[in-house]
Image: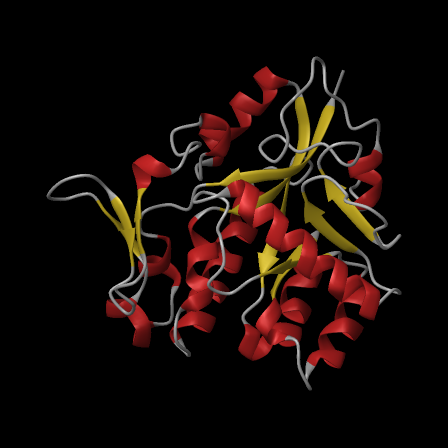
């Protein structure tokens, strides 16, 4: 029985940002440091970013590897036909100061695009949009084949109409995130609760768009919100597998995945 995951995390490579970020931000760029003790994800441009890699449950999971030649064989073993990739470290970058934040998130998007082109019928991805240019980055990434977009809630404001229009035009579901809030690796339960509440609020304001969020639906939720959780879409790391879990075609349909 084949499975399509609506939520699978990818562990960014140690030097992703040093290799891909604009040269002006090279010395301030996020990175993994492995010298002198336990490895950590840090950002010289913002010392508040300091994540011990040992605290991330899926850090050594081969199916979460940022190396597709490690990742794909593991997916074969698990019978996962396709998956939507969500970032691991990059959630922590939403609090960075501008313009470092925009440069860092844009670098991640370009990197994950390169990853999913290595297995174009199996790997798909969500982009993470910088608040300073959310609509512009969505318009850049949509033709490249992204299947969802993470939107920091602080980007909601007078300039949001352009983002709503871009998402509707590209038929890309949006995931709302809280800048400075919980991250999946720090506290998934709190992260899912925050994401669900923010997404419900956005969906009520823009019922013509599609939204994706995590956790189980609580009470009456907008019809345009899909949940990765109980009685919703199946996700490899967002929900516990129950037996021979299958999405029954719901994930592929929701994200408009190719046959």
Q: Is residue 157 left or right of residue 211?
A: left
Residue occupying the point 44% across, 32% down: 58
Q: Quarter holding the C terminus? A: top right
| Vertical relation: 169 (above or below) 124 | below
Which residue of the protein is positioned furthest toward the left in this rendering?
36
Percent of width and height locating residue 179: 51, 65
Q: Is residue 176 visible?
A: yes
* Residue at left offset 47%, top offset 65%: 94
Task: Check the image and name the residue furthest to the front.
Answer: 219
- In the depicted view, which residue is nearer to us: 211 or 178? 178
**Quadrant assignment, res 93:** bottom left
Q: Quadrant of the N terminus?
A: top right
Which of 94/62 is in front?
94
Task: Depth check: give the residue in front, 48 or 75.
Answer: 48
Is 38 situated left or right of 126 in this image? left
Q: How is the image coloured?
A: secondary structure
How many dots with numbers? Answer: 0
Farthest bottom residue? Answer: 158
Considering only vertical position in the picture, is 192 above or below 234? below
Regarding residue 146, the answer to whether it shows in the image is no
Q: Residue at x 61, y 68 (%)?
A: 153
Question: Residue 231 placed where, x, y %?
Answer: 80, 32
Q: Image height check: is 104 above or below 38?
A: below
**Location of residue 3 (image quadrant):** top right
- Residue 255 percent across, percent down from the top left: 78, 46
Q: Please give left or right for residue 198 compared with residue 28 in the image.
A: right
User: What percent of the width, then of the height, locates residue 12?
Assistant: 42, 46
């Amino acid at each position: 029985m084949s499975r399509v995951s609506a939520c699978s995390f990818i562990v960014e490579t140690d030097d992703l940002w040093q290799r891909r970020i604009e040269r002006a931000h090279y010395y301030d760029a996020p990175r993994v440091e492995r010298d002198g003790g336990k490895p950590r994800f840090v950002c010289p441009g913002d010392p508040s970013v300091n994540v011990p890699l040992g605290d991330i449950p899926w850090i050594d999971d081969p199916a979460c590897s940022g190396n597709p030649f490690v990742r794909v064989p593991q997916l074969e073993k698990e019978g996962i036909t396709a998956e939507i990739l969500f970032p691991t470290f990059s959630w922590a970058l939403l609090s960075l100061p501008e313009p470092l934040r925009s440069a860092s998130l844009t670098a991640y998007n370009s990197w994950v695009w390169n990853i999913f082109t290595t297995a174009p019928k199996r790997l798909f991805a969500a982009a993470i949009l910088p608040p300073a240019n959310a609509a512009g980055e969505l318009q850049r990434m949509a033709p490249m084949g992204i299947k969802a977009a993470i939107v920091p809630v602080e980007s909601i404001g007078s300039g949001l109409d352009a983002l709503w229009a871009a998402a509707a035009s590209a038929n890309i579901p949006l995931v709302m995130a809280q800048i400075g809030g919980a991250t999946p690796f720090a506290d998934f339960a709190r992260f899912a609760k925050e994401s669900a509440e923010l997404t419900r609020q956005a969906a009520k304001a823009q019922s013509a768009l599609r939204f994706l969020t995590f956790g189980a639906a609580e009470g009456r939720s907008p019809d345009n919100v899909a949940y990765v959780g109980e009685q919703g879409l199946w996700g490899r790391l967002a929900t516990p597998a129950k037996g021979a879990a299958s999405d029954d075609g719901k994930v592929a349909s929701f994200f408009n995945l190719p046959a």
